[in-house]
Amino acid sequence: MSKAWRPERIEDHGLISDGQTAALVHRDGTIDWLCMPRYDSEACLAALLGDGDNGGWWMAPEGEVTGRSRRYLGDTLILETVIETAGGSVAIIDFLPVERRQAPDIVRIVEGRSGCVKMCSHLALRFDNGRTHPLTRSESECEAVAIAGPNAVVLRFDAPIEHGDRAFVSRFTVKEGERCCFTMTWFPSYRDLPDPVDPLAAYDEARSYWEKWASRFDYDGPDRPIVMRSLLLLKGLIHQPTGGIVAAATASLPERPGGDRNWDYRYCWLRDATFTLLAFHHAGYHEEARRWVEWLRRAVAGEPIEVQPFYRVDGGRHTFEWEAEWLAGFGGAKPVRFGNAAVSQLQLDVSGEVIDAIYLAGRKGLAEDGDVLVHMLADRLETLWRKPDAGIWESRGPVKHHVYSKVMCWVAFDRAARWMADRDRAAADRWRGLANEVRQEVLSRGFDKRRNSFVRAYGDDALDAALLRLPLVGFLDAKDERMLGTVAAIERELLHDGFVRRYSPEKTDDGIGGDEGAFLAVSCWLADVYTLQDRRDDARAIFDRLCAAANDLGLLSEEVSLKDGRALGNIPQALSHLALVNTALGLAHENGPLRPQSRE
């Protein structure tokens, strides 16, 4: 409960969400990350990226702790942390009410499980991403308000609230069978106090909501528990009012311990479009898939169309990258960045992902009117595809003619031609011709005969794990000799102990430098390709390693350290969970991955 408090491991965290925002809860019961009222809002609890003085909510016994355990309650995002002491045990039940739209709340219920335990709640609010101490006032013995600029919260506790050391402190005792409830509700500071939430009723509603949603998953095959947990976490990253899905709930968690690979992922990446569509559709969540397509169409709408790599959850285009110098960074990893400068990069693969998602949605009956959008995107790409770009990994180094980017240009023209085949024959013929032109260029300039492998970029002999996607998008058969050679090269250079690195940083100028961990999503892609190559045992071995990389609550980060197995990057990472779901369902399917497109 002091400034010295710092989280040490990314995987020590669990997620709670209401579909508007999310919080991270440390295994000791501390909430050290919370943005309100939205995923991409400023944090009011930011100890995750600094220390205790940057905002956190500690809930702990006053005596010595002898044991801890935690779990999600059934198929929900309600987190239970059980703490044992010499005098008894308590459960801290944390969740965000899901059906309440007046304002976002966070609820903590402390329940006595045995004996008698003296507890202390210590809430240090720090608005403006951990920098600003709020102005506070008491409404009653158990109710207080904190205000900073446009933001305000009201606290309604079952225990008296003391104001001390720039924090709200409550000391209370719980015996077996007793409950003590704590709620924090955000509201605009210029408005009246929102109505109170009934914590116990909100708990029943939240549990019913999550269990009802989970019951729609009718898959009964292997790996069901981890797939169900991944789907629940993905649901927790969907902004319910708009249908957009954020890439992660966090910002600036390091991809290299103590390093500067620290990025803000609280935005909706278009690159995840097809992965999201496949995962939710094949898991039976057609409404989530449909709403994602609708969000996608709104976000990229407009003429002249200028497609960004990602957007805000409401489809807004404007974001900029800046550094919060007052935050020490997770494990000392600086700078702490908010916003993301990659928004202005040219990433050619994005148009392919969007057109592919619209085409797939049309085939699945999830999108009926995509003519204008497909036409605009394909027309724009026709003027851009010959340019170098930043690539799928958003390199901040020199732009290049990335092979995977060109392949996704092929996907864009191929799917646009298919979409327009019965609608606009002239346009379909033109795009089919462009698809053939792109394909021939990739085969002649993107394949290194000396290495017997596709390479990262034209004239560059470095590898790129994104090349594993070639058979998954239908560019080449997985058993084509060129793909067999590419997989063999990736196995030699990028595969380590069952995990795949995106590329070799020592051979690639990505503008950042230094090492990083293995990327979990591309490890899934290798498993998918193995399945298509009839190497199911190898695919299963990779998949099992991926499952073991999840923490005890089933959360996957972006990367894993090859040195000690620790989680790296933002958590939970949507792309990691999307890839895991698609790989699991593909392994269960007798024909392998749920799709690739066959090449016509």
Image (cartoon, grey):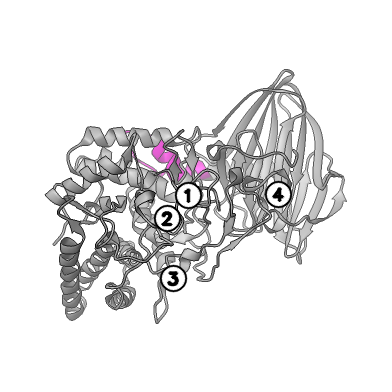
In the picture, the disc for residue 288 is 2
In the picture, the disc for residue 298 is 3
Q: Dot 4: few (<14), some (14–19), or many (≥20) neighbours within 10 Å?
A: many
Q: CA distance from mark 2 to mark 4?
A: 35 Å
Q: Is residue 140 left or right of residue 132?
A: right
Residue for badge 4: 54
Residue at image coords 47%, 49%: 235
Task: Kindly identify the amino acid type of the residue bearing the numbered disc 2.
Answer: Glu
Q: Closer to the camera: disc 3 or disc 4?
A: 4
Q: Is residue 591 left or right of residue 329?
A: left
Is there CB contact under 8 Å for labels 1 and 4?
A: no
Looking at marks 1 and 4 on the same chain, the residue that comes earlier in the sequence is marked by 4
Residue at image coords 18%, 57%: 447
Quadrant occupied by the C terminus: bottom left
Q: CA distance from mark 1 to mark 3?
A: 20 Å
Q: Position of residue 495 (x, y in %)?
A: 31, 40
